[in-house]
Amino acid sequence: MNPKIFVGAAVAVFAVIVGVIAFSGSSIISDVSDTGTFFPSSEQVQRDVLPLEIELEDLSIVEVTDTEATLEIVFKVSNPNSKSVILQLVKYDIYESGVKLKTGQIGERAEGMVTGSNYFIILNEQPTILHDKITIKNSGNTPELWSALMNNAPQWQVKGEAFFNLSSMLSGGENQITFEFP
């Protein structure tokens, strides 16, 4: 017998299997919703994804000298969803007595050609703790601020936003939340 017949039959069987899976209407990949669709619409994704919960665990002074101060900020991120979520970026501003001191970020948002990844997978079972160290230079223009830092008595306020999406890039829908801590 001709071997081309066997190869042709194998290709036809493979094509039928792929066609049955593709057009079966059942969900093969389901990230958050159980809507029964292979690629849920962005409206379904937005409706089904609960926002991450971000708490300010700590904002402390690590070291203060005459020329600079080192601070450490700690966020606790919890996921109320039943599936994991990718936290791309937490952007924050630190204020002392209403004056903006520093802007910082943990993670990064993918733009253009992605060569690496600096994001966090937030599981639903346990919170994730994010740390960042900040250095503030003493310009000499804010003696009240430096006095508050030296005496360990600053009046902190932290404002920010976080960008997250589902655990699969196929599921679409970038989400954003804002937060503020006095």
Image (cartoon, rainbow, N blue to C red):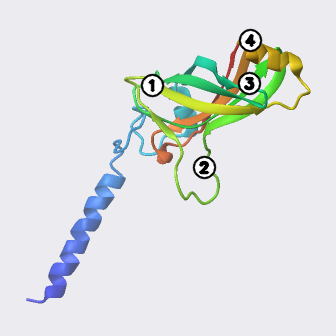
Sequence-wise, the earlier of marks 3 and 4 is 3
Q: Would you identify the image quadrant in which residue 7 lies?
A: bottom left
Read off the residue under disc 4: 151
Q: CA distance from mark 2 to mark 1?
A: 23 Å
- Choose mark 2 or mark 1, whichever is in front: 2
Badge 1 amino acid? Asn
| Up-down relation of residue 134 to residue 146 (above or below) | below
The circle on residue 110 is: 2
Residue at horizontal 52 percent and vertical 54 percent from the top: 116
Q: Are marks 3 and 4 in contact (CB under 8 Å)?
A: no
Q: CA distance from mark 4 to mark 1?
A: 42 Å
Read off the residue under disc 1: 81
**Mark 1: secondary structure:** loop
Q: CA distance from mark 2 to mark 3?
A: 24 Å
10 Å crowding of disc 4: few (<14), some (14-19), many (20+):
few
**Mark 4: secondary structure:** loop
Read off the residue under disc 3: 94
Q: CA distance from mark 1 to mark 3?
A: 29 Å
Near-viewer residue (144 or 179):
144
Near-viewer residue (128 or 99):
99
Q: Position of residue 95 (x, y in %)?
A: 78, 21
10 Å crowding of disc 3: few (<14), some (14-19), many (20+):
many
Q: CA distance from mark 4 to mark 2?
A: 41 Å
Q: Are marks 1 and 3 in contact (CB under 8 Å)?
A: no
Sequence-wise, the earlier of marks 1 and 3 is 1
Badge 3 amino acid? Ile
Badge 4 amino acid? Asn
- Choose mark 3 or mark 4, whichever is in front: 4
| Up-down relation of residue 158 to residue 13 (above or below) | above
Q: CA distance from mark 3 to mark 4?
A: 18 Å
